[in-house]
Image (tube, rainbow, N blue to C red):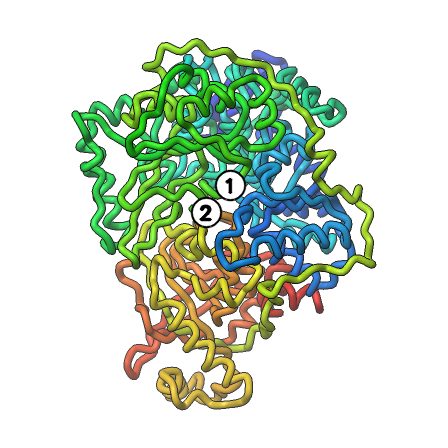
Amino acid sequence: MVTLSNGGAYLVNGRDVYEDNDGALSQIKKMTGKDITCSQAKKGTMAYSILEKHNVSGNMDELQIKFDKLTSHDITFVGIIQTARASGLEKFPIPYVLTNCHNSLCAVGGTINEDDHMFGLTCAKKYGGVYVPPHQAVIHQYARECLAGGGKMILGSDSHTRYGALGTMAMGEGGPELVKQLLSKTYDIKMPKVVGVYMTGAPVQGVGPQDVALALIKAVFANGYVNNKVLEFVGPGIDSLSADFRIGIDVMTTETTCLSSIWKTDDTIKEFYEIHNRPEDFEYLYPSDIAYYDGMVYIDLSKIKPMIAMPFHPSNAYTIEELNANLMDILDDCEKKALVSLDGQVEYSLKDKVRNNRLYVEQGIVAGCAGGGFENICAAADILRGKSIGSDEFTLSIYPASTPIYMELARNGMLAELMGTGAIVKTAFCGPCFGAGDTPANNALSIRHSTRNFPNREGSKLQNGQISSVALMDARSIAATAANKGYLTPATDMDTKYTNPLYHFDSTIYANRVFDSKGVADPTVDIKFGPNIKDWPDMIALTDNIMLKVVSEIHDPVTTTDELIPSGETSSYRSNPLGLAEFALSRKDPAYVGKAKEVRAVEEERQKGVYPDASGFAQAFDVVKKDDRFKDMDPVSCGIGSTIFAVKPGDGSAREQAASCQRVLGGLANIANEYATKRYRSNLINWGMLPFIYNGDDKELPFANDDYIFIPGIADIIRDKKESCKAYVIKEESLIECEFELGRLTDDERDIILDGCLINYNRR
């Protein structure tokens, strides 16, 4: 289904692939008559041309990107605007769309969610933005319908900001990166590598975009093949895919850990823009006659089968056929993985879901930016036509991704078809994707056409003995399973007549309900602040020396942002930095918050000039000062903070709170073997935290939980642009030397760390 090249590859005339070897360029010259170098061919990708157009550095190796548009939802825009306000924001310099699709339900904390919405509306008026009210559209569907444009770049504060299928390079980053754009600064990265995704063939009936996406994720996630690179979709197979199908694959590229994506565009995408009354925003995009890619992913669409990603990651994927044939073995493997993911906190088994040698599931969900598209829902309705989902445990809920889609489903009769089966059709809402809606029952298994199935994401609370599981599937196979009343069934097993109705976009609802300032700010508007909306606490500059205490040690192969700061019930508190911080690591290490607060209290006293003689830090400083190299070091001038160790933290969401919660609790650093995503590392830096790398075996660390680590001269190390530092672990009466790497930091990133956070940097 999916194979990978061993190295780079050349694409000639958009169709012929030559893998990079000693004879590749001579073959290409013989075929085309063109004498070209690899470095010249690298400029032939679509990604290169778009990045070049948006780069203001004048150096294509060191990019400084200015985006065309920004977009955020109601979990992130409050913190972003509060940060920008603290940094001197006067107006939005580029279009900024505030959608309200995550905290749409006012279910936690009284008026908190709606207060945040009113904050957003008044900020859109005051600073000149766009405000999309709750239940109108999920963030990415609104962007597809109203924001995307050929050759454009969009930055969003949601990790699934992906509009490559429409010819738009989009990136999902933590909020501070949007703050930089709001302050007319730049997004700074090295020129990313570009990996081609070469598609051939056409999908068989019953296979949907999620099936292709899961096959792709399975092939490239674990080996890091596309990590922090741009995926560029090319090849003749694209011609067989509708716009909705391409979009459904594209949005899931986030789960490969790639940086962004871009697709060649054609008349199918031109028609998409025409349907959405924006023909002027279309642009034909395709690579040059000869383009070089740093790797090539080959996808034969005709060989893709219905897929299922078992708990607890989208890459844990199998064909449904394979799962059914090896059911008990695969379920046993899932249980072994659960022992790692859940730390043995609850008993976990899926084997009780096997009934009559078939896997039974209790819930189906088709929702959000991945599943809630028009074609997905129509296909599900075709499969379910005239059938019933039954009256037992199994339930089916469907969330169209926008009100225009909902309206068209009502007009063409698909809504009635679905509701007649016993399915529930709800409004546009992202909640099922992160545990704020349709959480499964304890020990239940839910199949979802959504984006993620991380552990504890959909409402589990291990500390309360609660656990539920989510498997990812395509809407078509979810509907087939629903037609069989909860017994897992691939859509290819169904004899379905697909009607493929045409889509008609009606923008009336947006014209009637969306507030659009047209870029005109009104400084006379007063922002409405609910009582839960709090300013960021003050953060001090980096001191010359620091003393860290390790307050959490995580040895999972990968730690997700959901585990660093839970989603779901915490989302209402994301406009309250201190309130939200109470939930940090709560599902992974419940002791973390208390330990971090103890460290923060010592640091607060230090800032008042109080020597930490009543804490474990006093003993640590005594050991340090016994060493002649550090005998003159003054503990009162030495910054005190906490740190966590994790093997590979930061997979998943772009949410900055995974880092900022640690910072407001007194965190000064993370120590990791590597960082799962660029965006998490950027979030650490933007909140003034040191992104340390320790290259040794995580099972033989020189430090452990509750140990103290002294790092002398850290401020000078940052100023002098050094990429590593010596650290000293205090063990009884000894200093154990080790080395931490900082990796590449831009000049701005170094200044942000020195200033203590992005807010301080911008103020200065």
> Could you say which quadrant of the image residue 695 lies in?
bottom left
What is the total number of numbered labels drawn onto the structure image? 2
Residue name at image x 49 percent, y 28 percent: 249
Q: Are marks 2 and 1 in contact (CB under 8 Å)?
A: yes
Q: Amino acid at mark 1?
A: Cys
Q: Earlier in the sequence, mark 2 or mark 1?
A: 1
Residue denoted by label 1 = 430
- Above or below, 522 against 387 in this view is below
Q: Is residue 363 left or right of residue 640?
A: left
Whether residue 35 appears in this view of the structure is: no
Residue name at image x 31 percent, y 29 percent: 391
Residue name at image x 55 percent, y 63 percent: 576
Nearer to us in this view, 245 or 134: 134
Q: Quadrant of the N terminus?
A: top left
Label at residue 436:
2
Provide residue 673's location: percent of width, then percent of height.
38, 55
Residue name at image x 53 percent, y 44 percent: 159
**Crowd rating for badge 1 (residues with CA inside 10 Å; few <14, some 14–19, many 20+):** many
- Above or below, 517 against 495 in this view is below
Whether residue 331 appears in this view of the structure is: yes
Provide residue 285's location: percent of width, then percent of height.
66, 23
